[in-house]
Image: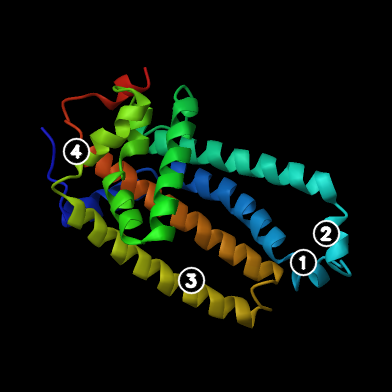
Amino acid sequence: MKNELTLTNLLNQTVAELTENGRIVGIFLALMVPVSGFFGWVAVAGGAASSIFDLSSTTNILALGGGLIAIGLAAFAFMIALTYWFYAALMAYESAPGFGRIWPWIGIYILASLGIGFGLILLIVPGVILVVRWAIALPLVIEGKIPAMDTFGESWERTSRYGWSIFGLLVILVIGMLILTGIVTGISTILGGQASIPGIILAALVDALNSAVFVAVSVAAWRLSTDKSDEVAEVFG
């Protein structure tokens, strides 16, 4: 038996995913904030941030050359692996779920990102539809009961009756995140600007919180659409 994937149920389950997995969420934030902070620093390093780190010009950043690129690639790979871990850990209610499905998951992650990205760039509406209807594709890959490429169709089928519920929650969350971002931007300005060290750290924290919340929505939608007679532990056995 499974619960209805209504807006209220999805909101409640999303909150439950975050509160009942407090330790997992804490680990994710502790690891994601430094990574997001690094990318935030790189994004502003050619401008105001150069003075913060006593770099006289953009040339000082570019002089790091291949070393900075290598660090960036390593940080990106770590971020992808951490995101996979967070999905799997929430699904299994444990902090050591393993990485047995990471390669097919990365493949679907890339395809989903490309599809949604092109949809948003070209016409916006198709991209939003894909965000909603593919909401549980990544958890389905980790679940591993069907071939990875079939998870798009399975996600589309499971969300067919509940698209507006998922869309409604995403709108609420986006509005909330925009308000939070505005508050953080104001605080950053007081503390020295968005390119200051406090500003970069606060922005990284908001980015990490955004990631945690939207992963929780995906896992919550998966859990509500999954027959509760199935043991989650079997997925990771």
Is residue 199 visible from the viewing direction of this image?
A: yes
> What residue is shown with label 4?
157
| Distance (Cα) linking label 3 and label 1 | 23 Å
> What residue is shown with label 1?
46
The residue lying at 16 percent from left, 50 percent from top is 162
Which amino acid lies under the numbered mark 3 shown in the image of this protein? Thr
Q: Position of residue 84 (x, y in %)?
A: 47, 36
The residue lying at 75 percent from left, 73 percent from top is 48
| Distance (Cα) linking label 4 and label 1 | 46 Å
Q: Residue furthest top?
A: 237
Q: Are marks 2 and 1 in contact (CB under 8 Å)?
A: yes
| Distance (Cα) linking label 3 and label 2 | 27 Å
> What residue is shown with label 3?
181
| Distance (Cα) linking label 2 and label 1 | 7 Å
Nearer the N terminus, badge 4 or badge 3?
4
> What residue is shown with label 2?
61
SS type, badge 4: helix
Picture quadrant of residue 41: bottom right
Q: Is residue 61 left or right of residue 125?
A: right
Nearer the N terminus, badge 3 or badge 1?
1
Q: Position of residue 237 (x, y in %)?
A: 36, 17
Q: Are marks 4 and 1 in contact (CB under 8 Å)?
A: no
